[in-house]
């Protein structure tokens, strides 16, 4: 499992990237944004990730050999608070999407109304052109 440490509050958290040690060494991770359980969002590169086995405190950092490091606070400490924030953010995004969808639907209805209006105006214009052509042809024949 790949973990990160928040650049602001220094809390360890799971990056939601699942990989074993072998895959971790071959991954190309750069410029990804992650949000810690406290809500701090930062950009992380390859050097910031570290592999942590589920069974101990042995950490393997990218490009280094395995080494023993002090244990960090459990990533589950504030998981529920972090999940609540994530759910709240997703609800806000959903609300914005629904509002945007309503606006787009309204605009589409207006465009369809305009298209119908333009279509009927074009038909009337063609009818008038035919009448004018007919009247012009009739005048030419009358003059002759």
Image: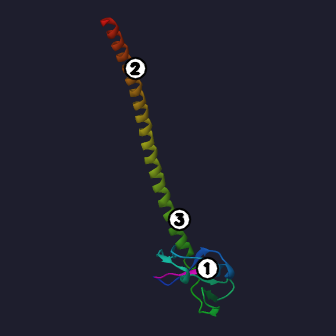
Mark 2 lies on a secondary structure that is: helix
- Locate the N terminus and report the quarter of the image it occupies: bottom right
What's the distance in space between the residues labelled 2 and 3, CA to CA?
A: 59 Å
Residue 12 visible in image: no
**Residue at horizontal 67 percent and vertical 82 percent from the top:** 21
What's the distance in space between the residues labelled 2 and 1, CA to CA?
A: 72 Å
Residue 95: percent from left, percent from top: 47, 56
**Residue 79 is inside the magenta segment:** no
Side of 143 where 23 appears, left or right: right
For the image, the number of numbered tags is 3
Q: Are marks 2 and 1 in contact (CB under 8 Å)?
A: no
- The quadrant in which residue 118 appears is top left
Residue 59: percent from left, percent from top: 63, 88
Between discs 1 and 3, the one toward the N terminus: 1
Q: Residue furthest front?
A: 144
Numbered badge on residue 2: 1
Q: Which residues are magenta?
A: 1-7
- The quadrant in which residue 26 appears is bottom right
Q: Are marks 1 and 3 in contact (CB under 8 Å)?
A: no
* Residue carrying label 2: 127
Numbered badge on residue 87: 3
Side of 46 where 115 appears, left or right: left
* In this view, the mark in front (2 or 1): 2
**Residue at horizontal 30 percent and vertical 7 percent from the top:** 143
Side of 51 where 142 appears, left or right: left
Mark 3 lies on a secondary structure that is: helix
In the image, residue 99 sits, relative to residue 24, either above or below, namely: above
Q: Foreground residue, 57 or 121? A: 121
Between discs 2 and 3, the one toward the N terminus: 3
- Colour scheme of the picture: rainbow
């Amino acid at each position: 499992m790949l973990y990160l440490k928040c650049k602001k509050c220094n809390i360890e958290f799971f990056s939601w990237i699942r990989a074993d040690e072998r895959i971790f060494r071959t991954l190309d991770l750069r410029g990804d944004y992650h949000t810690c359980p406290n809500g701090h969002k930062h950009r992380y590169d390859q050097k910031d990730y570290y592999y942590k086995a589920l069974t101990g405190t042995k950490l393997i950092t990218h490009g280094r050999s395995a080494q023993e490091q002090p244990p960090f606070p459990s990533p589950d400490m504030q998981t529920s608070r972090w999940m609540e924030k994530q759910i709240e953010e997703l609800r806000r995004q959903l609300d914005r999407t629904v509002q945007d969808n309503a606006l787009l639907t309204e605009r589409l209805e207006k465009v369809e109304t305009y298209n119908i209006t333009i279509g009927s105006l074009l038909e009337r214009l063609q009818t008038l052109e035919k009448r004018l052509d007919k009247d012009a042809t009739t005048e030419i024949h009358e003059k002759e």
